Amino acid sequence: MMSIANKNFRDFNSAEFINCFLKTRRETIQMLKTFQNVLGSELRVPNLPELNLPIWEFCHVGWFYERWISRNERRVFDRECDSAVDWNAFCAENTYFERADTLFDSSQIHHDARWKCTLPTYQQTLNYLESTSEDIVREFETKPPQTKQDFYFFKLSLAHEMMHLEAFKMTAQRLKFEIPGLKQKFFNYDSKSEKNFLPFSEQIISPFYEGYEFHFDNEIHNQAVTIKPFKIQASCVTLGDFLEFLLSDDFLDPRFWSIKGQKWLAVNFHKNSFYKDLKKKFLAFKNIKQDFVEISWFANKEKMALNLPALHISYFEAEAYAKWFGMRLPTEFEWLVASHSKSFYWGSVWEWTADSFYAFPTFVPHPYKDYSKPWFDGNHMILKGASFASCEDFRNIHFRNFYTPNRNDIFSGFRIACSL
Protein backbone atom coordinates (compact mmCIF):
# COMPACT_ATOMS: atom_id res chain seq x y z
CA MET A 1 0.00 0.00 0.00
CA MET A 2 1.18 3.47 -0.70
CA SER A 3 0.34 6.89 0.52
CA ILE A 4 1.87 10.27 -0.39
CA ALA A 5 4.52 10.63 -3.09
CA ASN A 6 7.65 8.51 -3.22
CA LYS A 7 11.01 9.34 -4.75
CA ASN A 8 11.29 7.93 -8.25
CA PHE A 9 13.10 8.34 -11.56
CA ARG A 10 12.07 12.00 -11.89
CA ASP A 11 14.48 13.11 -9.18
CA PHE A 12 17.28 10.57 -9.54
CA ASN A 13 20.86 11.73 -9.43
CA SER A 14 23.41 10.23 -11.81
CA ALA A 15 24.20 7.13 -9.73
CA GLU A 16 20.54 6.43 -9.03
CA PHE A 17 19.64 6.85 -12.67
CA ILE A 18 22.25 4.47 -14.05
CA ASN A 19 21.41 1.83 -11.44
CA CYS A 20 17.72 2.10 -12.31
CA PHE A 21 18.42 1.99 -16.04
CA LEU A 22 20.53 -1.17 -15.76
CA LYS A 23 17.95 -2.83 -13.49
CA THR A 24 15.15 -1.92 -15.88
CA ARG A 25 17.05 -3.15 -18.94
CA ARG A 26 17.82 -6.45 -17.21
CA GLU A 27 14.11 -6.87 -16.56
CA THR A 28 13.29 -6.04 -20.18
CA ILE A 29 15.79 -8.63 -21.44
CA GLN A 30 14.42 -11.23 -19.02
CA MET A 31 10.93 -10.37 -20.26
CA LEU A 32 12.07 -10.96 -23.85
CA LYS A 33 13.43 -14.38 -22.87
CA THR A 34 10.18 -15.25 -21.08
CA PHE A 35 8.17 -14.30 -24.17
CA GLN A 36 10.48 -16.36 -26.38
CA ASN A 37 10.12 -19.42 -24.14
CA VAL A 38 6.32 -19.20 -24.37
CA LEU A 39 5.70 -17.89 -27.88
CA GLY A 40 8.63 -19.25 -29.84
CA SER A 41 11.44 -17.49 -31.67
CA GLU A 42 9.20 -15.19 -33.75
CA LEU A 43 7.10 -14.08 -30.77
CA ARG A 44 3.95 -14.02 -32.90
CA VAL A 45 0.64 -13.06 -31.27
CA PRO A 46 -2.83 -12.38 -32.68
CA ASN A 47 -3.38 -8.95 -34.22
CA LEU A 48 -5.65 -7.50 -31.55
CA PRO A 49 -6.22 -3.77 -30.88
CA GLU A 50 -4.94 -4.01 -27.29
CA LEU A 51 -1.75 -5.94 -28.17
CA ASN A 52 1.52 -5.01 -29.80
CA LEU A 53 3.58 -7.51 -31.77
CA PRO A 54 6.23 -8.37 -29.14
CA ILE A 55 9.33 -8.36 -31.39
CA TRP A 56 8.24 -4.95 -32.68
CA GLU A 57 7.64 -3.63 -29.15
CA PHE A 58 10.96 -4.83 -27.74
CA CYS A 59 12.77 -3.25 -30.70
CA HIS A 60 10.72 -0.08 -30.22
CA VAL A 61 12.05 0.16 -26.65
CA GLY A 62 15.65 -0.05 -27.90
CA TRP A 63 14.97 2.32 -30.80
CA PHE A 64 13.56 4.99 -28.48
CA TYR A 65 16.89 5.32 -26.65
CA GLU A 66 18.75 5.28 -29.95
CA ARG A 67 16.54 8.03 -31.40
CA TRP A 68 16.52 10.38 -28.43
CA ILE A 69 19.98 9.79 -26.95
CA SER A 70 22.51 7.93 -29.13
CA ARG A 71 21.51 9.71 -32.37
CA ASN A 72 20.32 12.98 -30.87
CA GLU A 73 22.91 15.67 -31.59
CA ARG A 74 21.08 18.17 -29.39
CA ARG A 75 20.60 16.15 -26.25
CA VAL A 76 19.31 18.99 -24.09
CA PHE A 77 15.73 20.13 -23.60
CA ASP A 78 14.53 23.25 -21.81
CA ARG A 79 10.77 23.56 -21.95
CA GLU A 80 10.98 27.31 -21.47
CA CYS A 81 13.09 27.84 -24.60
CA ASP A 82 12.85 24.81 -26.88
CA SER A 83 9.19 24.49 -27.83
CA ALA A 84 9.83 25.42 -31.48
CA VAL A 85 12.88 23.19 -32.08
CA ASP A 86 12.75 20.81 -35.06
CA TRP A 87 14.11 17.76 -33.29
CA ASN A 88 14.27 15.68 -36.46
CA ALA A 89 16.95 18.05 -37.70
CA PHE A 90 19.19 16.89 -34.85
CA CYS A 91 18.65 13.16 -35.38
CA ALA A 92 21.66 11.49 -36.99
CA GLU A 93 20.86 8.98 -39.72
CA ASN A 94 23.08 6.12 -38.55
CA THR A 95 20.90 3.37 -37.07
CA TYR A 96 21.52 -0.11 -35.71
CA PHE A 97 18.92 -1.58 -38.05
CA GLU A 98 18.37 -0.38 -41.59
CA ARG A 99 15.08 1.53 -41.87
CA ALA A 100 14.77 1.60 -38.07
CA ASP A 101 12.84 4.87 -38.09
CA THR A 102 10.35 3.45 -40.57
CA LEU A 103 9.95 0.21 -38.64
CA PHE A 104 10.03 1.20 -34.98
CA ASP A 105 8.77 4.78 -34.77
CA SER A 106 5.19 4.32 -33.56
CA SER A 107 4.34 7.69 -35.11
CA GLN A 108 5.26 6.43 -38.56
CA ILE A 109 4.01 2.84 -38.61
CA HIS A 110 0.41 2.20 -37.61
CA HIS A 111 -0.61 -0.72 -35.42
CA ASP A 112 -1.79 -3.22 -38.04
CA ALA A 113 1.20 -2.61 -40.31
CA ARG A 114 3.54 -3.98 -37.65
CA TRP A 115 2.26 -7.49 -38.37
CA LYS A 116 3.15 -7.16 -42.06
CA CYS A 117 6.77 -6.04 -41.71
CA THR A 118 9.93 -8.08 -41.88
CA LEU A 119 11.23 -7.72 -38.35
CA PRO A 120 14.48 -8.74 -36.62
CA THR A 121 14.88 -12.24 -35.22
CA TYR A 122 14.76 -12.99 -31.52
CA GLN A 123 18.57 -13.10 -31.33
CA GLN A 124 18.92 -9.82 -33.24
CA THR A 125 16.41 -8.20 -30.88
CA LEU A 126 18.28 -9.48 -27.84
CA ASN A 127 21.55 -8.15 -29.30
CA TYR A 128 19.84 -4.80 -29.98
CA LEU A 129 18.70 -4.40 -26.38
CA GLU A 130 22.18 -5.31 -25.11
CA SER A 131 23.89 -2.99 -27.61
CA THR A 132 21.67 0.02 -26.86
CA SER A 133 22.24 -0.60 -23.15
CA GLU A 134 25.99 -0.40 -23.67
CA ASP A 135 25.56 2.73 -25.78
CA ILE A 136 23.53 4.50 -23.10
CA VAL A 137 26.04 3.68 -20.36
CA ARG A 138 28.87 4.90 -22.59
CA GLU A 139 27.03 8.12 -23.49
CA PHE A 140 26.19 8.67 -19.83
CA GLU A 141 29.77 8.14 -18.68
CA THR A 142 31.29 10.18 -21.52
CA LYS A 143 29.20 13.25 -20.82
CA PRO A 144 27.29 12.86 -17.53
CA PRO A 145 24.15 15.03 -17.29
CA GLN A 146 24.64 17.97 -14.97
CA THR A 147 21.25 19.72 -15.09
CA LYS A 148 17.63 18.68 -15.43
CA GLN A 149 17.79 19.91 -19.03
CA ASP A 150 20.73 17.56 -19.71
CA PHE A 151 18.87 14.74 -18.00
CA TYR A 152 15.56 15.16 -19.86
CA PHE A 153 16.01 12.64 -22.68
CA PHE A 154 17.65 10.08 -20.40
CA LYS A 155 14.71 10.18 -18.00
CA LEU A 156 12.13 10.28 -20.80
CA SER A 157 13.63 7.14 -22.34
CA LEU A 158 13.82 5.35 -18.99
CA ALA A 159 10.17 6.20 -18.23
CA HIS A 160 9.20 4.98 -21.69
CA GLU A 161 10.87 1.60 -21.05
CA MET A 162 9.24 1.23 -17.63
CA MET A 163 5.80 1.88 -19.16
CA HIS A 164 6.41 -0.76 -21.82
CA LEU A 165 7.49 -3.24 -19.15
CA GLU A 166 4.04 -3.00 -17.63
CA ALA A 167 2.51 -3.32 -21.09
CA PHE A 168 4.41 -6.60 -21.58
CA LYS A 169 2.90 -7.87 -18.33
CA MET A 170 -0.56 -6.91 -19.59
CA THR A 171 0.15 -8.84 -22.79
CA ALA A 172 1.15 -11.93 -20.81
CA GLN A 173 -2.11 -11.79 -18.86
CA ARG A 174 -4.11 -11.34 -22.05
CA LEU A 175 -2.41 -14.35 -23.64
CA LYS A 176 -2.60 -16.42 -20.43
CA PHE A 177 1.01 -17.06 -19.55
CA GLU A 178 2.98 -16.37 -16.40
CA ILE A 179 5.52 -13.70 -15.55
CA PRO A 180 7.42 -15.30 -12.65
CA GLY A 181 6.75 -13.67 -9.30
CA LEU A 182 4.33 -11.05 -10.64
CA LYS A 183 0.98 -12.27 -9.32
CA GLN A 184 2.28 -12.57 -5.78
CA LYS A 185 2.82 -8.82 -5.68
CA PHE A 186 -0.93 -8.41 -6.05
CA PHE A 187 -1.84 -11.19 -3.61
CA ASN A 188 0.46 -9.62 -1.01
CA TYR A 189 -1.56 -6.43 -1.08
CA ASP A 190 -3.27 -5.90 2.27
CA SER A 191 -6.44 -3.91 1.68
CA LYS A 192 -7.68 -4.35 5.26
CA SER A 193 -11.18 -3.94 3.84
CA GLU A 194 -11.07 -0.21 4.52
CA LYS A 195 -14.42 1.17 3.39
CA ASN A 196 -14.20 4.45 5.24
CA PHE A 197 -14.39 7.76 3.41
CA LEU A 198 -12.08 10.72 3.75
CA PRO A 199 -13.72 14.18 3.74
CA PHE A 200 -12.03 17.24 2.25
CA SER A 201 -13.12 20.85 2.53
CA GLU A 202 -13.02 23.38 -0.29
CA GLN A 203 -9.50 24.33 -1.24
CA ILE A 204 -7.45 25.96 -3.95
CA ILE A 205 -4.63 23.85 -5.34
CA SER A 206 -1.94 24.01 -7.97
CA PRO A 207 -2.08 20.68 -9.86
CA PHE A 208 1.47 21.18 -11.07
CA TYR A 209 4.38 20.35 -8.76
CA GLU A 210 7.33 22.41 -9.96
CA GLY A 211 9.78 20.64 -7.65
CA TYR A 212 10.30 17.58 -9.83
CA GLU A 213 13.38 17.46 -12.01
CA PHE A 214 11.36 15.84 -14.82
CA HIS A 215 7.79 16.31 -16.05
CA PHE A 216 5.74 14.85 -18.86
CA ASP A 217 4.27 17.50 -21.12
CA ASN A 218 0.66 16.80 -20.13
CA GLU A 219 1.37 17.45 -16.42
CA ILE A 220 2.31 21.12 -16.65
CA HIS A 221 -0.49 23.33 -15.33
CA ASN A 222 0.25 26.93 -14.42
CA GLN A 223 -3.12 27.92 -13.00
CA ALA A 224 -4.75 27.47 -9.60
CA VAL A 225 -7.85 25.27 -9.37
CA THR A 226 -10.68 25.40 -6.83
CA ILE A 227 -11.78 22.01 -5.51
CA LYS A 228 -15.24 21.95 -3.94
CA PRO A 229 -15.87 19.90 -0.76
CA PHE A 230 -15.97 16.15 -1.37
CA LYS A 231 -15.39 12.80 0.23
CA ILE A 232 -13.60 9.83 -1.26
CA GLN A 233 -12.93 6.21 -0.37
CA ALA A 234 -9.69 5.65 1.50
CA SER A 235 -9.04 2.45 -0.46
CA CYS A 236 -10.13 1.01 -3.79
CA VAL A 237 -13.42 -0.84 -4.19
CA THR A 238 -12.81 -4.46 -3.24
CA LEU A 239 -13.53 -7.52 -5.31
CA GLY A 240 -16.27 -8.50 -2.85
CA ASP A 241 -17.93 -5.11 -3.06
CA PHE A 242 -17.86 -5.15 -6.87
CA LEU A 243 -19.28 -8.69 -6.97
CA GLU A 244 -22.27 -7.55 -4.92
CA PHE A 245 -23.16 -5.31 -7.85
CA LEU A 246 -22.11 -7.75 -10.55
CA LEU A 247 -24.23 -10.58 -9.14
CA SER A 248 -27.30 -8.47 -8.37
CA ASP A 249 -30.30 -7.96 -10.62
CA ASP A 250 -29.29 -4.31 -10.80
CA PHE A 251 -26.18 -5.07 -12.84
CA LEU A 252 -28.14 -5.23 -16.10
CA ASP A 253 -30.42 -2.33 -15.20
CA PRO A 254 -29.84 0.45 -17.78
CA ARG A 255 -30.46 3.10 -15.10
CA PHE A 256 -26.91 2.56 -13.86
CA TRP A 257 -25.18 2.64 -17.22
CA SER A 258 -24.35 5.54 -19.52
CA ILE A 259 -25.44 5.30 -23.15
CA LYS A 260 -21.94 4.20 -24.17
CA GLY A 261 -21.81 1.90 -21.15
CA GLN A 262 -25.04 0.20 -22.21
CA LYS A 263 -23.55 -0.50 -25.63
CA TRP A 264 -20.41 -1.93 -24.03
CA LEU A 265 -22.54 -4.08 -21.71
CA ALA A 266 -24.63 -5.47 -24.56
CA VAL A 267 -21.75 -6.15 -26.96
CA ASN A 268 -18.60 -6.72 -24.92
CA PHE A 269 -19.41 -7.88 -21.40
CA HIS A 270 -20.04 -11.55 -22.20
CA LYS A 271 -17.07 -11.61 -24.59
CA ASN A 272 -14.39 -9.67 -22.79
CA SER A 273 -15.25 -8.95 -19.15
CA PHE A 274 -12.84 -10.41 -16.62
CA TYR A 275 -15.91 -11.36 -14.60
CA LYS A 276 -18.13 -12.91 -17.27
CA ASP A 277 -17.65 -16.46 -15.94
CA LEU A 278 -18.54 -15.42 -12.38
CA LYS A 279 -21.75 -13.84 -13.68
CA LYS A 280 -22.63 -17.18 -15.25
CA LYS A 281 -21.54 -19.28 -12.27
CA PHE A 282 -23.25 -17.48 -9.39
CA LEU A 283 -26.87 -16.45 -9.36
CA ALA A 284 -26.37 -13.98 -6.56
CA PHE A 285 -23.64 -12.80 -4.22
CA LYS A 286 -25.18 -14.73 -1.33
CA ASN A 287 -24.25 -17.95 -3.13
CA ILE A 288 -20.58 -17.21 -2.48
CA LYS A 289 -19.88 -18.87 0.86
CA GLN A 290 -16.12 -18.43 0.98
CA ASP A 291 -13.92 -15.41 1.47
CA PHE A 292 -12.53 -15.84 -2.02
CA VAL A 293 -13.57 -16.64 -5.58
CA GLU A 294 -11.77 -18.64 -8.24
CA ILE A 295 -10.87 -16.69 -11.38
CA SER A 296 -8.66 -17.54 -14.37
CA TRP A 297 -5.74 -15.11 -14.31
CA PHE A 298 -2.55 -15.29 -16.36
CA ALA A 299 -1.99 -19.04 -16.83
CA ASN A 300 -4.04 -20.56 -14.02
CA LYS A 301 -7.18 -20.39 -11.96
CA GLU A 302 -6.47 -18.40 -8.83
CA LYS A 303 -8.29 -18.06 -5.53
CA MET A 304 -8.72 -14.32 -5.12
CA ALA A 305 -9.61 -12.98 -1.70
CA LEU A 306 -12.75 -10.88 -1.70
CA ASN A 307 -10.99 -8.10 0.21
CA LEU A 308 -8.45 -7.60 -2.58
CA PRO A 309 -9.06 -4.63 -4.88
CA ALA A 310 -11.28 -5.35 -7.85
CA LEU A 311 -9.10 -5.34 -10.95
CA HIS A 312 -9.42 -5.62 -14.73
CA ILE A 313 -12.40 -3.28 -14.44
CA SER A 314 -13.44 -1.25 -17.48
CA TYR A 315 -14.34 2.40 -17.04
CA PHE A 316 -17.96 1.57 -17.87
CA GLU A 317 -18.16 -1.01 -15.07
CA ALA A 318 -16.59 1.40 -12.59
CA GLU A 319 -18.96 4.19 -13.63
CA ALA A 320 -22.01 1.91 -13.29
CA TYR A 321 -20.96 0.63 -9.86
CA ALA A 322 -20.48 4.17 -8.58
CA LYS A 323 -23.94 5.19 -9.76
CA TRP A 324 -25.47 2.03 -8.26
CA PHE A 325 -23.82 2.91 -4.94
CA GLY A 326 -25.29 6.41 -5.15
CA MET A 327 -21.96 8.10 -5.75
CA ARG A 328 -19.59 8.78 -8.66
CA LEU A 329 -15.98 8.36 -9.71
CA PRO A 330 -13.59 11.01 -8.35
CA THR A 331 -12.23 13.71 -10.58
CA GLU A 332 -8.53 13.74 -11.35
CA PHE A 333 -7.94 16.72 -9.04
CA GLU A 334 -9.99 15.23 -6.19
CA TRP A 335 -7.82 12.12 -6.42
CA LEU A 336 -4.71 14.30 -6.37
CA VAL A 337 -5.89 16.21 -3.29
CA ALA A 338 -6.73 12.99 -1.45
CA SER A 339 -3.43 11.34 -2.35
CA HIS A 340 -1.59 13.69 0.01
CA SER A 341 -3.40 12.13 2.98
CA LYS A 342 -1.57 9.41 4.88
CA SER A 343 -4.92 7.62 5.16
CA PHE A 344 -5.31 7.38 1.38
CA TYR A 345 -4.00 4.10 0.01
CA TRP A 346 -3.01 3.72 -3.62
CA GLY A 347 -0.68 1.69 -5.80
CA SER A 348 -2.35 -1.72 -6.11
CA VAL A 349 -4.33 -0.99 -9.31
CA TRP A 350 -4.64 1.91 -11.72
CA GLU A 351 -7.74 3.92 -10.83
CA TRP A 352 -10.31 5.27 -13.27
CA THR A 353 -11.35 8.87 -12.74
CA ALA A 354 -14.38 10.76 -14.03
CA ASP A 355 -12.25 12.89 -16.37
CA SER A 356 -11.43 12.34 -19.99
CA PHE A 357 -7.79 12.90 -20.95
CA TYR A 358 -7.45 16.54 -21.90
CA ALA A 359 -4.81 19.22 -22.30
CA PHE A 360 -4.29 21.71 -19.51
CA PRO A 361 -4.71 25.35 -20.64
CA THR A 362 -0.98 25.96 -20.92
CA PHE A 363 -0.16 22.69 -22.69
CA VAL A 364 2.80 22.72 -25.06
CA PRO A 365 4.03 19.42 -26.54
CA HIS A 366 7.51 18.28 -25.64
CA PRO A 367 9.93 16.82 -28.23
CA TYR A 368 8.16 13.44 -28.30
CA LYS A 369 5.08 15.14 -29.70
CA ASP A 370 2.94 12.03 -30.01
CA TYR A 371 3.14 11.15 -26.32
CA SER A 372 0.08 13.22 -25.37
CA LYS A 373 -1.34 15.42 -28.10
CA PRO A 374 -2.94 12.74 -30.36
CA TRP A 375 -4.86 11.31 -27.39
CA PHE A 376 -6.67 14.52 -26.40
CA ASP A 377 -9.52 13.17 -28.52
CA GLY A 378 -12.28 12.77 -25.94
CA ASN A 379 -12.06 8.99 -26.26
CA HIS A 380 -9.56 8.34 -23.48
CA MET A 381 -10.13 8.51 -19.73
CA ILE A 382 -7.59 9.46 -17.07
CA LEU A 383 -6.37 6.85 -14.60
CA LYS A 384 -4.35 7.75 -11.52
CA GLY A 385 -1.95 5.95 -9.23
CA ALA A 386 -0.06 2.82 -10.26
CA SER A 387 -0.52 -0.94 -10.15
CA PHE A 388 1.21 -3.92 -8.59
CA ALA A 389 2.79 -4.43 -12.05
CA SER A 390 4.21 -0.90 -12.30
CA CYS A 391 7.94 -0.43 -11.84
CA GLU A 392 8.60 0.85 -8.33
CA ASP A 393 10.75 3.66 -9.63
CA PHE A 394 7.97 4.93 -11.90
CA ARG A 395 5.12 5.45 -9.40
CA ASN A 396 4.05 9.04 -8.83
CA ILE A 397 0.83 10.78 -7.81
CA HIS A 398 1.09 13.38 -10.59
CA PHE A 399 1.35 10.91 -13.46
CA ARG A 400 -1.64 11.02 -15.81
CA ASN A 401 -2.28 7.61 -17.32
CA PHE A 402 -4.96 7.26 -20.01
CA TYR A 403 -6.86 4.50 -21.80
CA THR A 404 -10.08 4.08 -23.73
CA PRO A 405 -13.02 3.24 -21.41
CA ASN A 406 -13.59 -0.23 -22.85
CA ARG A 407 -10.14 -1.48 -21.82
CA ASN A 408 -10.10 -4.07 -19.05
CA ASP A 409 -6.89 -5.85 -19.96
CA ILE A 410 -5.04 -3.21 -17.94
CA PHE A 411 -4.53 -3.67 -14.20
CA SER A 412 -7.33 -1.24 -13.41
CA GLY A 413 -9.73 -0.70 -10.55
CA PHE A 414 -11.39 2.31 -8.97
CA ARG A 415 -12.69 4.06 -5.86
CA ILE A 416 -15.81 6.18 -5.46
CA ALA A 417 -16.48 9.71 -4.27
CA CYS A 418 -19.21 12.30 -3.91
CA SER A 419 -19.62 16.03 -3.42
CA LEU A 420 -20.37 17.42 0.03
Image (tube, rainbow, N blue to C red):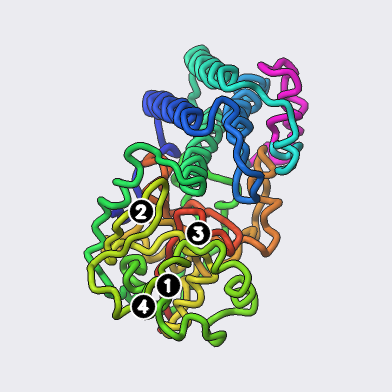
What element does badge 4 sit on?
Answer: helix
What element does badge 1 sit on?
Answer: strand
Label 4 or label 2, whichever comes before in sequence order: 4
Q: What is the number of the mark on residue 244? A: 4
Q: Mark 4: which amino acid?
A: Glu
Give the CA distance from mark 1 to mark 3. Answer: 22 Å
Label 3 or label 4, whichever comes before in sequence order: 4
Q: Mark 2: which amino acid?
A: Lys
Image position of 393 with respect to 70: above or below:
below
Residue drawn at the location 41% of the way across and 82% of the way down: 248
Give the CA distance from mark 4 to mark 2. Answer: 21 Å
Q: Which residues are magenta?
A: 80-105
Q: What is the number of the mark on residue 301? A: 2
Residue 351 counted in the magenta span: no
Residue bearing the label numbered 1: 203
What element does badge 3 sit on?
Answer: strand
Q: Is residue 76 visible?
A: no
Label 1 or label 4, whichever comes before in sequence order: 1
Label 1 or label 2, whichever comes before in sequence order: 1
Give the CA distance from mark 3 to mark 2. Answer: 27 Å
Residue drawn at the location 40% of the way across and 78% of the way down: 247
Residue 94 counted in the magenta span: yes
Residue bearing the label numbered 3: 383
